[in-house]
Image: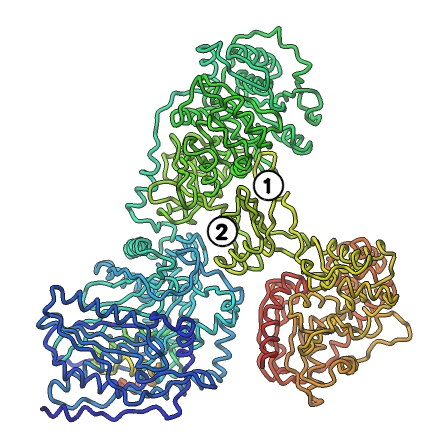
């Protein structure tokens, strides 16, 4: 026995018997564990590998000593009345497992298996112990010391303290010396410091900083593109940055006065930005959080995660991005004690399950160079805590091996291979950054690896194929010469042989030449589907011209526009009057005798570079644009098609696509170039599935095309299953849903191949192709490039995206159009220089979002500009559609954002039934709610027999009907009489609903004051009953309104009373809302549907609205407030009170609050909507009548344009059907006086101090009165001002979209008060 | 063993300014340097630098506990 053995009973610093509260940091971990008590995810662990002899007994004594010194380790956590507390575990036995594993075949593997099993065991926080040790001998002179601690009691820095101290004590004991005194401070010190912070001014300052920095609640993109609940485990991939690159990274950092972690964080931001197609990213940075704190000496849980928001622009240099990181971290560090969990809570992200940050970058610069009695040891982290998304752990090892970079991923989001890919790309990017000058723009960097670049640029695009220089028409003339007697064309009962067709087309061509049709010229063709249409198209081409199809179904305005824009040499129509009269010479085929013209081919044949056709597509600016496609482009396209899907004499191709849609181009010409027969569908036939099925069968069609939504319709047609004579079915024009492919297989079997093609009009119809396997899964790719065509998926810097990473799709090669007719600037902006092609070549920017698959196909992901934002949330509609389509009862699905009532945007889903199924909207919503965040679940789902289609056969989104009832009509009481029934119908009509129950309240269903005015008018005209808006406030349901009308007292105008009962019912403490400048409180009616139905709401309105000349306006703000207090005491004699006011109403609410407090009452809520104290107004001019008129119009929701007088304003209100227009003119005049009076009183008012917190909403869009600031309230508020910025102007605050935001905060606060 | 040059308060300021990429004149002697961007990495750098160039013995924790120039001068035995 050595002396040391007697010396290891070091005194312990025990916790107080009553225990200690948790620090905020510990609470965060406690709640995370409470969410999933059985999860071992919060077990953190480290393994120290000791190279040399270890005495297990001495080691155990050292651990006991260190455990006795580290009180934070020895706790358990129990829930008490005041929340969780930590207590000392009595008679703690050191949890130490010692094993000698040398006898096994692979001791190290056995050791790691043991450690992994231990790590996977959840810990009971209430019992403890919350840590464990193991000492495993894996070789004669090699030991593994395993340390596992729950994250609630220890963080990374804490580990380093424990390990260092253990090494120190062991070394002393092993040498027979007493260890030095404990270097640790107490857990109680930490708790005390934390408690002090919670009530400090710094805390408030920090909170304001974070609330301000993230007020707009930015998206936090992550690599997975979706979020998931935390898993119980994680995947880890470990890699090292080479020592050389590590050194270069350090040099690079110091050359720009940064540190290597900052450079690494900047590189991660660059990677994330490019990989997620986002210019703004938010990284999470775990922070030690101990600087200047007693925590430096406490092994415990202190760390915090801070969000770092960065903008990554391709034109910025790496040094600039790093500087952004340095300054961002510097700013964050000043407020680093404010908890991550609290920032999320403050921003309201908790309830929505939204992330504050994307990936975490966890830098651990603390290397332990420890020795145990002379034996060297190195640390390996095994688990750094729960992984919500992705954590990049970086360890700086001073042994010269470079940085160790671990990628830990949530298995619910990242597979091991995916994780490895991101990691290897990041490491390669780091290498490149390290070897590139810091002042180079970020645009030079691609996130793809060298091998991936070669793949996506060259391997996937190896499409070179020599083709002869020819045209669209040349091969048809050659075919006509080869098989003159074969059937070229069938239309109903008519048919033409190749020779007949060629002769007729030639005769017309000679005629067209007389009208100036020649190479380079345009001829418009406005002929419904018929033999003549095909003849006319061929004739234009034969004359050398390019054809411009004019769909006769298009509106006249659009046809006129196209003619004026394209200025064709002539327009060929089936009859006069087919197109609107413009200056363009018209040739009407029904009046034309071409029998005298030669039947031989004209000599005016076009060349490969001449334009073949011009097709108009809609422009994002609303002005259609003509795309000019040359012969060589479309010739390449048709040659590829014939090679890929050879057809010949026995084949019959169905022509059903309208000529204005470019798919029709291959339909018209492919068959005629190869000796097959073209079967022309009747006009309108393309929309009739029964007709199509019949035609395919009767005409023995072997090749046809469908837009996916039309294919879905076609497959629903019972006769479709008989169309098994088809040899090729092509889809293009829209994303092809996987479900449609499966349905295709079910209906037509595997014998009919389905091909998915993709291409914009700007690249000769199609540029990619994919054979659809009916048994496949996942999104249907658009496939590989066709001959002589290259596809690029590029990021914001126009650098290639590696496979799997979304970017914008660019096209290059021979199929590109010449550009837009007569629009050089637009052409130059969409057809840009191809940086990856031969000098002088161009590429076309599609605006489509896409990604490469690993094996060289492209997946279409939507439009780059197709993103929808609803109530501030970014939504990919395709995701919701895909989710709907997963339901077996659903055939096709569509989702859109509707605005059936102004300012009221909502998400609506549409589905068609699959087979004989009957989709249930409620079940579908429940299904969506299961897999999508709440904001992505449509409020209504509409089942349609089939989808409305546009002239081109695409889903016509604008023709989708508004959803039916959102009311509670179903199951409600039936109307008791005619009046109730009529009123219910009128309510529904005005609200845009299918039905409204007799007991459904108008404002609960989303009624606004504007809609209220409409309803009042409709009731007046329909029932001849006299009523006012005020009646509606008092009687909000059809039943109660009917009763009011029956009682005959509906016309008395309570709507102008001093106290307006917006909702008098409910068991909660009433909310009193004070009128803005105009004196009317109807603007608060929008609160009703957004607050708890049990929350009564009263409006306070100005005296004198009746316009009675005997009523004088108040002389002071105090007088007004006193009067309002009398009024509100009639419904609530004593506090607590809840007050709210917008604009002047806020000043009033504050004044009333002060007076109530002075009278000894409690005011538990004071909410101010963009209201500013009198000091802020004193120096500005009192509004004149003209300003008051502007205000009056604003109250009604209009901007003043040219209304000059009171009369003009009244006329506008009447014309626009404003709720205010229903008021007598004397009231409107009174409103003008009230506005002016209120402005005067407000400037004269002297505020006193309100003792309490204020909930404040700032209309934060830039405004003229830029001096207005909520800080001006500081002298008049005893408590805190909790501000929320809204991106809107002052007048917009009570509009629906803003009220949603206001009420989200307000409702939460009211709920807290209800439960307090 | 070579004698190390003595550390001065001005040298401390200059070194702090250097790792922060700031001008020494902008580094106060009595304020919390965390507010000026000092972090653990940079303190480690300074600990190493002063140990190497001036033979100081203060640890990371010693410096991190009171991150201000004056407090460090006392800890590091710097002369003014």
Residue nearest the observer in this picture, A773 or A589: A773
Separation of residues labelled 1 and 2 (CA atoms)? 19 Å
Q: SS at mark 2?
A: helix
In primary-sequence order, the first of circles 1 and 2 is: 2
Report in which chain the residue with disc 2 lies.
A
Give the percent coordinates (x, y) of residue A835.
Answer: 38, 40
Number of numbered tags placed on the structure image = 2
Using the image, name the chain to which the residue with label 1 belongs.
A
- What SS does tag 1 mark? loop
Can you give x and y, in whole percent of width and height, for residue A1223 in the image?
84, 63
Q: Are marks 1 and 2 on the same chain?
A: yes
Q: A1113 above or below A735? A: below
Q: Is residue A1014 left or right of residue A506?
A: right
User: Is residue A1118 shown to the viewer in this render?
Assistant: no
Which colouring convention does the figure follow? rainbow
* Quarter of the picture holding the N terminus of chain B: bottom left
Q: Is residue A891 above or below residue A113?
A: above
- Is A214 left or right of A89, judged from the image as shown? right
Mark number displayed over residue A946: 1
The answer to whether residue B60 shows anywhere in this view is yes
Q: Position of residue A819 (x, y in %)?
A: 51, 33
**x, y percentage for residue A933?**
50, 60
Residue A1116 sits in quarter: bottom right
Picture quarter containing residue A813?
top left
Front residue of A1012 and A394: A1012
The residue to which callout 2 is attached is A883
């Amino acid at each position: 026995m050595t002396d040391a053995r007697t010396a290891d009973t070091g005194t312990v610093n025990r916790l107080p018997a009553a225990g200690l509260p948790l620090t905020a940091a510990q609470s965060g971990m406690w709640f995370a564990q409470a969410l999933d008590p059985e999860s071992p995810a919060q077990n953190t662990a480290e393994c120290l590998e000791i190279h040399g002899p270890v005495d297990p007994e001495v080691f155990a004594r050292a651990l006991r000593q260190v455990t006795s010194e580290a009180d934070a380790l020895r706790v358990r956590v129990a829930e008490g009345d005041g929340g969780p507390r930590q207590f000392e575990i009595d008679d703690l036995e050191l949890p130490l497992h010692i094993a000698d594993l040398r006898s096994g075949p692979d001791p190290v593997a056995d050791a790691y298996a043991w450690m992994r099993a231990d790590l996977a065991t959840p810990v009971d926080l209430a019992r403890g112990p919350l840590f464990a040790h193991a000492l495993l001998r894996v070789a004669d002179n090699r030991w593994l010391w395993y340390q596992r601690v729950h994250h609630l009691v220890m963080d990374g820095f804490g580990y380093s303290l424990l390990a260092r101290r253990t090494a120190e004590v062991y070394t002393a004991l092993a040498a027979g010396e007493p260890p030095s005194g404990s270097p640790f401070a107490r857990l109680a010190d930490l708790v005390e410091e934390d408690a002090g912070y919670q009530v400090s001014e710094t805390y408030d300052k920090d909170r304001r900083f974070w609330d301000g920095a993230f007020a707009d609640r930015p998206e936090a993109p992550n690599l997975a593109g979706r979020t998931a609940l935390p898993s119980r485990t994680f995947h880890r991939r470990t890699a090292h940055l080479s020592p050389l690159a590590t050194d270069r990274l350090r040099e690079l950092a110091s050359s720009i006065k940064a540190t290597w972690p900052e450079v690494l964080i900047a590189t991660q931001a660059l990677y994330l930005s490019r990989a997620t197609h986002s210019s703004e990213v938010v990284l999470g940075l775990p922070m030690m959080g101990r600087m200047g704190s007693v925590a430096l000496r406490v092994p415990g849980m202190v760390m915090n995660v801070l969000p770092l928001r960065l903008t990554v622009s391709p034109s910025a240099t790496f040094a600039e991005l790093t500087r952004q990181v340095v300054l961002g971290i510097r700013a964050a560090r000043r407020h680093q004690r404010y908890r991550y969990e609290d920032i999320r809570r403050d921003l309201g992200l908790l309830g929505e399950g939204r992330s504050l940050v994307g990936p975490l970058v966890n830098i651990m610069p603390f290397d332990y160079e420890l020795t145990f009695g002379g034996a060297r040891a190195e640390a390996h982290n095994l688990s750094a805590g729960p992984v919500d998304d992705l954590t990049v752990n970086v360890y700086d090892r001073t042994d010269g091996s470079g940085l160790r970079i671990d990628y830990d991923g949530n298995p619910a989001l990242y597979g091991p291979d995916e994780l490895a890919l991101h990691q290897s790309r990041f490491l390669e990017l780091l290498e490149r950054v390290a070897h590139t000058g810091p002042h180079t723009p970020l645009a030079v960097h691609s996130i793809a690896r060298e091998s991936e670049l070669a793949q996506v640029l060259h391997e996937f695009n190896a499409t070179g194929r020599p083709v002869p220089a020819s045209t669209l028409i040349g091969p048809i003339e050659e075919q006509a010469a080869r098989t003159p007697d074969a059937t070229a064309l069938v239309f109903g009962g008519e048919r033409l042989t190749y020779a007949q067709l060629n002769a007729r087309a030639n005769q017309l061509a000679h005629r067209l030449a007389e009208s100036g049709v020649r190479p380079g010229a345009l001829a418009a063709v406005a002929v419904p589907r018929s033999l003549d249409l095909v003849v006319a198209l061929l004739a234009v081409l034969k004359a050398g011209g390019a054809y411009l199809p004019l769909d006769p179904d298009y509106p006249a305005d659009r046809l006129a526009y196209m003619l004026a824009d394209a200025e064709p040499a002539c327009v060929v129509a089936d009859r006069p009057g087919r197109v609107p009269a413009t200056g363009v010479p018209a040739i009407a085929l029904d009046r034309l005798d071409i029998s005298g013209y030669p039947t031989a081919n004209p000599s005016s044949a076009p060349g490969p570079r001449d334009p073949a056709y011009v097709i108009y597509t809609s422009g994002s600016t609303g002005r259609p644009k003509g795309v000019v496609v040359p012969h060589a482009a479309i010739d390449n396209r048709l040659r590829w098609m014939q090679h890929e899907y050879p057809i010949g004499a026995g084949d019959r191709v169905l022509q059903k696509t309208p000529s204005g849609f470019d798919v029709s181009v291959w339909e018209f010409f492919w068959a005629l170039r190869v000796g097959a027969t073209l079967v022309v569908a009747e006009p309108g036939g393309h929309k009739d599935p029964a007709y199509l099925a019949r035609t395919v069968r009767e005409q023995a069609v072997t090749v046809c095309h469908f837009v996916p939504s039309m294919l879905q319709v076609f497959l629903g047609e019972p006769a479709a299953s008989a169309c098994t004579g088809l040899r090729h079915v092509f889809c293009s024009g829209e994303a092809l849903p996987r479900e449609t492919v499966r349905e295709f297989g079910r209906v037509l079997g595997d014998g009919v191949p389905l091909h998915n093609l993709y291409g914009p009009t700007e690249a000769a119809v199609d540029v990619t192709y994919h054979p659809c396997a009916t048994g496949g899964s996942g999104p249907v790719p658009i496939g590989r490039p066709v001959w002589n065509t290259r596809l690029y998926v590029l990021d914001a810097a126009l650098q290639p995206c590696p496979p799997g990473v979304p970017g914008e799709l660019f096209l290059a090669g021979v199929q590109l159009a010449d550009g837009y007719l007569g629009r050089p600037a637009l052409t130059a902006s969409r057809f840009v220089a191809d940086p990856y092609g031969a000098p002088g070549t161009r590429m076309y920017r599609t605006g489509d979002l896409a990604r490469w698959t690993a094996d060289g196909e492209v997946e279409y992901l939507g439009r780059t500009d197709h993103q929808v934002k609803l109530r501030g949330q970014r939504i990919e509609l395709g995701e919701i559609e895909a989710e709907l389509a997963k339901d077996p009862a659903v055939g096709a699905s569509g989702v859109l954002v509707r605005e059936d009532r102004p300012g009221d945007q909502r998400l609506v889903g549409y589905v068609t039934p699959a087979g004989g199924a009957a989709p249930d909207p409620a079940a579908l919503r429940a299904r969506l709610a299961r897999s999508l965040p709440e904001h992505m679940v449509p409020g209504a789902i509409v089942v349609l027999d089939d989808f409305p289609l546009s002239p081109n056969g695409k889903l016509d989104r604008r023709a989708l009907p508004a959803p039916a009832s959102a009311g509670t009509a179903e199951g409600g009481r039936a109307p008791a009489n005619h009046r109730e029934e009529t009123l219910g119908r009128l309510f529904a009509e005005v609200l845009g609903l299918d039905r409204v129950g007799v007991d459904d309240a108008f404002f609960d269903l989303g009624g606004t004051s504007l809609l209220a005015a409409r309803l009042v008018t409709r009731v007046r005209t329909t029932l001849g009953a006299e009523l006012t808006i005020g009646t509606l406030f008092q009687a909000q349901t059809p039943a109660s309104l009917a009763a009011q009308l029956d009682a005959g007292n509906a016309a008395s105008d309570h709507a102008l009373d001093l106290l307006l009962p917006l909702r008098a019912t409910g068991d909660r403490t009433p909310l009193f809302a004070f009128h803005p400048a105009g004196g009317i409180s109807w603007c608060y009616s929008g609160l009703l549907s957004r607050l708890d139905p049990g929350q009564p709401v009263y409006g306070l309105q100005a005296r004198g609205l009746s316009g009675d000349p005997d009523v004088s306006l108040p002389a002071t703000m105090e007088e007004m407030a006193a009067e309002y207090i009398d009024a509100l005491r009639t419904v609530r004699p004593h506090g607590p009170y809840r007050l709210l006011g917008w604009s002047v109403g806020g000043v009033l609410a504050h004044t009333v609050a002060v007076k109530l407090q002075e009278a000894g009452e409690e005011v538990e809520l004071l909410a101010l909507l963009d209201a500013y104290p009198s000091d802020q107004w004193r120096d500005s001019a009192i509004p004149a009548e003209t300003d008051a008129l502007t205000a009056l119009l604003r109250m009604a929701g209009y901007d003043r344009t040219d209304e000059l007088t009171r009369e003009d304003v009244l006329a506008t209100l009447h014309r626009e059907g404003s709720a205010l227009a229903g008021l007598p003119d004397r009231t409107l005049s009174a409103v003008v006086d009230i506005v002016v009076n209120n402005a005067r009183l407000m400037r004269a008012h002297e505020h006193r101090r309100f003792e309490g917190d204020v909930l404040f909403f700032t209309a934060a869009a830039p405004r003229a009165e830029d001096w207005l600031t909520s800080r001006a309230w500081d002298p008049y508020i005893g408590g805190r001002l909790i501000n929320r910025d809204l991106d809107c102007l002052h007048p917009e605050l009570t509009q629906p979209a803003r009220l949603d935001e206001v009420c989200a905060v307000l409702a939460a606060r009211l709920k807290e008060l209800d439960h307090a | 063993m070579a004698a190390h040059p003595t550390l001065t308060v001005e040298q401390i300021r200059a070194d702090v300014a250097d790792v922060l990429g700031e001008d020494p004149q902008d580094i106060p002697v009595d304020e919390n340097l965390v507010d000026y961007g000092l972090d653990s990495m940079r303190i480690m750098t300074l600990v190493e630098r002063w140990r190497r160039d001036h033979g100081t013995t203060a640890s990371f924790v010693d410096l991190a506990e009171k991150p201000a120039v004056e407090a460090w001068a006392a800890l590091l035995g710097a002369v003014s």
